[in-house]
């Protein structure tokens, strides 16, 4: 029986296939008034929509969630303490994000930096990793500098690096198992929310190259975790959305199918259709692949989406009456070579007396936590916090968890990562338009991929592509 709420399911998508097959890259004159559909109102979709509207295009943004912002979300405690449940940081050289913050009259504040960091290494507390860790960082930065971030598959060593599993490379290079385990957790987990044995060396090198190296990526002050946005990143997303012309944005409207012909493109939702001249799909490839396309996506593009799963992370905030660890000379910033939490940070805000200690769990450790009962998970997490800052961590006022892998329109974070062997075969499809369909999302960025900065840059790049055709 036909479901009237899903009109796209019964449309005769094949009626134009003969006329458009193989000819979807047809040229079209771009003038003021081009109609562009943007799928997704995260930072990439919003950046694309703003760039397009400012160029005179007529834009419709279709967002599956009932809010804008994508992989950002802020919860407010009763006293006004800001808990950022998703992406939260910006740092030096993320110029587009700082410009947007200023343009929309928001402000930033520095991440808490009081006290010394902690390194939990093979059951011992250290102030810094051993010298061989620094040697591995320098080698990775040297390799990454050889890549063109727009075409990493073109590097002379690309094929070899792409078939090299990061975990095995670290075990062969780091000098000892403890160093290899620590670096695998820090690099594969802390940067890409995956396991070192699930990632190729080439993908890590691309990620490092897109941000300028291990230093900018791993640093707090002077690095990618330097600043936070007053009001949280959602406040910026909401102001970007408000700057669009009235009627541009439609929430709670997932796009189920996209059909294109030599004349135009149609996005089908649960309740109807939106027609345009081009579409920007501003979603992670794993989510973009769940849309039905007519004609079907080329085999190589579809193959890429099958090989770029989302990362797996749990983010948890423990809230205390005060940041008590500071009195002990600790910053709350910690990394660990073992245990459920790979890293912790002091996420307290300067306008609240409360202390917020935030922990991150990745890959198999996150999966193990998901399998526990809520009480078991709580105990495990609090024991891990206590290992970092002492027994007082075991009695928080509140413990706030958020699992982006369970969120229907996200299904993981921080971003998608190409599986081993994928870059050298499918990499050129990551940003290449398919006819009238253009791709955005932080995964497609060549600068600060995986970050809000990358999302904005990717959206603006996709908008420029549409306008240039």
Image (cartoon, rainbow, N blue to C red):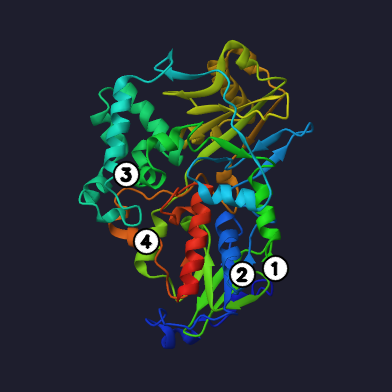
In 3D space, how far apart are the residues under numbered discs 1 and 4 (Cα atoms)? 37 Å
Mark 1 surroundings: few (<14), some (14-19) or many (≥20) residues within 10 A: some
Question: Which residue appears at 45% of the width and 76% of the height?
Answer: 469
Q: Is residue 397 visible?
A: yes
Front residue of 362/326: it is: 326
Q: Judge from the rendering whether residue 150 lies leftward or rightward of residue 274; answer left or right.
A: left
**Mark 1 or mark 3, which has the lower sequence index?**
3
Q: Are marks 1 and 4 in contact (CB under 8 Å)?
A: no
Tag shown at residue 245: 1
In 3D space, how far apart are the residues under numbered discs 2 and 4 (Cα atoms)? 33 Å
In 3D space, how far apart are the residues under numbered discs 1 and 3 (Cα atoms)? 43 Å
Above or below, 395 against 75 in this view is above
Q: Quick one: SS at disc 1?
A: loop
In 3D space, how far apart are the residues under numbered discs 3 and 2 (Cα atoms)? 39 Å
Q: Mark 3 — residue?
A: 200
Q: Mark 4 — residue?
A: 303
Q: Are marks 2 and 1 in contact (CB under 8 Å)?
A: yes
Q: Mark 2 — residue?
A: 53
**Mark 1 or mark 4, which has the lower sequence index?**
1
Question: Which residue appears at 52% of the width and 76% of the height?
Answer: 259
Q: Quick one: SS at disc 4?
A: helix
**Mark 2 or mark 4, which has the lower sequence index?**
2
């Amino acid at each position: 029986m036909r479901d009237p709420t899903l009109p796209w399911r019964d449309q005769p998508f094949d009626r134009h296939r003969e006329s458009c097959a193989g000819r979807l890259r047809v040229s079209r004159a771009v003038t003021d008034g081009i109609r562009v559909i943007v799928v997704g109102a995260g930072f990439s979709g919003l950046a694309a929509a703003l760039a397009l509207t400012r160029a005179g295009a007529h834009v419709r943004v279709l967002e599956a969630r009932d809010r804008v912002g994508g992989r950002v979300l802020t919860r407010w405690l009763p006293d006004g303490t800001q808990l950022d449940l998703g992406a939260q940081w910006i740092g030096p050289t993320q110029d587009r994000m700082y410009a947007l913050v200023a343009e929309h009259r928001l402000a930033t504040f520095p991440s808490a930096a009081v006290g010394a960091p902690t390194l939990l290494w093979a059951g011992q507390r250290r102030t810094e990793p051993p010298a061989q860790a620094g040697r591995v960082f320098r080698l990775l930065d040297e390799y990454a500098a050889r890549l063109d971030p727009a075409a990493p598959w073109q590097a002379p060593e690309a094929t070899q690096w792409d078939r090299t599993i990061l975990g095995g490379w670290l075990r062969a290079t780091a000098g000892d198992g403890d160093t290899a385990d620590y670096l695998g957790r820090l690099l594969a987990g802390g940067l890409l929310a995956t396991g070192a044995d699930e990632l190729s060396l080439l993908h890590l090198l691309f990620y490092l190259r897109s941000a300028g190296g291990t230093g900018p990526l791993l640093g707090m002050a002077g690095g990618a975790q330097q600043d936070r946005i007053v009001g949280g990143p959602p406040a910026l997303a909401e102001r970007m959305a408000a700057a669009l012309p009235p009627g541009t944005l439609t929430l709670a409207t997932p796009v189920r199918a996209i059909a294109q012909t030599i004349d135009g493109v149609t996005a089908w939702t649960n309740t109807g259709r939106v027609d345009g001249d081009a579409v920007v799909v501003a979603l992670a490839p794993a989510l973009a692949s769940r849309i039905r396309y007519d004609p079907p996506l080329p085999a190589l593009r579809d193959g890429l989406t099958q090989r770029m799963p989302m990362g797996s992370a749990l983010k948890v905030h423990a809230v205390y009456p005060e940041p008590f660890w500071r009195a002990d000379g600790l910053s709350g910033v910690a990394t660990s070579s073992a245990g459920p939490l790979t890293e912790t940070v002091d996420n307290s805000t300067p306008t609240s007396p409360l202390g917020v200690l935030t922990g991150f769990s990745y890959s198999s450790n996150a999966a193990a936590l998901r399998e526990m009962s809520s009480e078991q998970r709580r105990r495990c997490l609090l024991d891990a916090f206590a290992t970092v800052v002492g027994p007082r961590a075991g009695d928080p006022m509140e413990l706030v968890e958020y699992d982006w892998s369970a969120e229907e329109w996200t299904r993981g974070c921080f971003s998608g990562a190409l599986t081993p062997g994928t870059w050298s075969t499918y990499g050129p499809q990551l940003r290449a338009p398919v006819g009238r369909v253009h791709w955005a999302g932080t995964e497609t960025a060549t600068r600060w991929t995986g970050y809000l900065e990358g999302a904005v840059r990717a959206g603006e790049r996709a908008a420029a592509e549409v306008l240039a055709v």
